[in-house]
Amino acid sequence: MMDKSRGLEVDCVAYDLEDSVTTSNKAEARKKIRRFLDQPRAGGIKETAVRINAVESGLALDDLTEVLKAPNLDTIVVPKVNSPSDLHFITDVIRHTLPSRHPTTPTPTPHFPPPLNILALIESAKALSDLSSICETTPYLSGLIFAAEDFALDLSLTRTPSLTEFLYARSAIATACRAHNLPSTIDLVCTAYKGDAGLKILEEECLGGKGLGFNGKQLIHPNQVAVAQKAFAPGEEEVVWAVRIVVADQKAERQGRGAWTLDSKMIDAPVVGKARAIVGRAEACGIDVEVVKEKWKEQEPE
């Protein structure tokens, strides 16, 4: 299965040392993942991550000792982050083991690999109540992930198709990420992946999460990748709208106009900021924005 993952075209692949590995197999799994990550990078995977065991399990140090040897590791996914102390522990180990991969190191070169990232899984009421402190704990932190099943267990919730029982938690996590400028806001797993019905559920969950401020989703099967990528990428009409605003705003700025209209709707700084963000996201998703800009280069502020 790990070998098959190298053929994916995805933002991130996370290899697991936690729930999918029995206690008796932890040591062998660590070595297997470390050897696997010794291979040259897979061309279609932008970020390679390993989910270690929780700090409270007592297994995290052994996990880190092994996987931090891997030259092509980008991110450590830390489960069951309940308080800042969990991330302090991970940070101390990384700083001691790989001081050259601190976020303050120089621009990546062959001699200075890029900084290592941490993604924290939010799985409990305790974590949710301390989100601000968790987000401020370490410069390695690049985002939060909502772990719905463990959160439901902690609060004795039953997961329903509407996901309304998670609305507060999901909103809080997305808001915390934005407030602390964390680039990754990863939504809950969709357990449905088989057939058209399963993929329809996934699409609805993706669009719902996007509407709450998430910019990615945990996936458990390759069948889910295309649906999630399409859902989180800007749509064609959305890109056209954003490009028209960006093009027209450049002209409005030269004219000294801080507010103007487009299609009889007022355009001001917040709207322009949103449009620029959409254009940036479209470019990151591989959409040829320059073609759209060329088509709308004559757009004028009304």
Image (cartoon, rainbow, N blue to C red):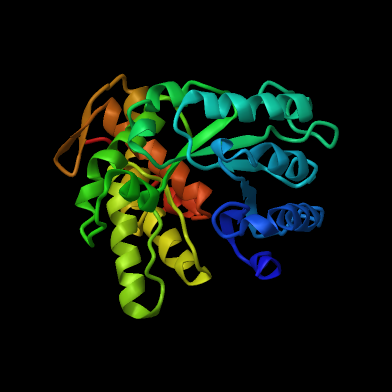
Q: Position of residue 254 (x, y in %)?
A: 37, 23
Residue sitting at x 31%, y 19%? 256
**Quarter location, residue 273:** top left
Q: Please determine whether, in this image, residue 243 is positioned above or below residue 131.
A: below
Quadrant containing the C terminus is: top left
Q: Position of residue 69 (x, y in %)?
A: 80, 42
Viewer-side residue, 6 vs 83: 83
Q: Please determine whether, in this image, residue 3 is positioned above or below residue 246.
A: below
| One can see residue 276 in this view | yes
Residue sitting at x 81%, y 53%? 38
Viewer-side residue, 94 vs 108: 94
Viewer-side residue, 255 vs 213: 213
**Quarter location, residue 86:** top right
Residue sitting at x 60%, y 29%? 140
Badge count: 0
Q: Where is residue 82 in the image (x, y as percent from the top left)?
A: 44, 32
Q: Please determine whether, in this image, residue 155 is positioned above or below residue 85.
A: below
Residue sitting at x 68%, y 54%? 26
